[in-house]
Image: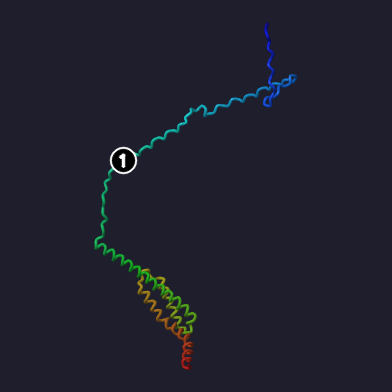
Amino acid sequence: VEVVEPPAPSPPPTAESPAPAAADAKAAPRASPAPSPPPAAPSADADAPMNDAEPKAEPAKKKKVKKTSLKVNYVAAAGMSSTDLQAAIEAEFQMELDDKVVMETQEKKNALEAYIYSLRSKLAGELSSFIHPKDRDALVSRLQQMEDWLYDAEEDTPKGVYIEKYNELAKLGDPIVARHRETNSRPGAVSTLIKSIEG
């Protein structure tokens, strides 16, 4: 005779385990699985071989230096002899002297030209009453002749010639200028004399 054991009673439900669904509840429809994503395209790096090691630096190439012996000939600078040195000093001194003469000659020429213009202008103005009209015309004519000669003078005209021409005109014009100066200064001189006598 077979003895059938009754089934063990199921344990009571706990808070951690949910209560079994009601027998009459309809089973929920089973959700369909989500579609799997398409396979990713293989990257270019995937095909490259894995090589984590850094590339080795190439050793620096040594420069080849070729040494060549050069032959050098030294030539000392020859100095001037005492005779040549003295001649060079004298030549330089002469050039300086010539330049000085040229400058002085030009100064005398300019002085003569300035005297001609100044005296002719004064004869037509402030000096006209201090010379006789006939003498004034003769002096103005002489000034014009001197001006013409001055413009036609050669470049190498000596300095002494300009000095001579200047002195020639100064002998004619300076006395007139002196009379004019004396006349203008006379009132002041007389006034000073009177004050000294009265004082």
Residue visible at 42% across and 83% down in the picture: 175
Q: Is residue 60 left or right of residue 74?
A: right
Q: Is residue 12 above or below residue 163?
A: above
Dividing the picture into quadrants, the one containing residue 174 is bottom left
Q: Position of residue 19 (x, y in %)?
A: 70, 23
Dividing the picture into quadrants, the one containing residue 77 is bottom left
Q: Is residue 72 left or right of residue 59?
A: left
**Residue closest to the far bottom:** 198
The residue at which mark 1 appears reads as 66
Residue visible at 31% across and 40% down in the picture: 66
Residue visible at 49% across and 81% down in the picture: 126
Q: Is residue 45 above or below residue 172?
A: above
Q: How is the image coloured?
A: rainbow
Q: Position of residue 62 (x, y in %)?
A: 35, 38
**Residue closest to the far top:** 1
Residue visible at 51% across and 27% down in the picture: 47
Three-letter residue code for mark 1? Lys
Q: How many marks?
A: 1
In this rendered view, identify the residue nearer to me: 153 or 18: 18
Counting other residues with Cα less than 10 Å from the Cα at mark 1, is it few (<14), some (14-19), or many (20 or more)? few
In this rendered view, identify the residue nearer to me: 165 or 91: 91
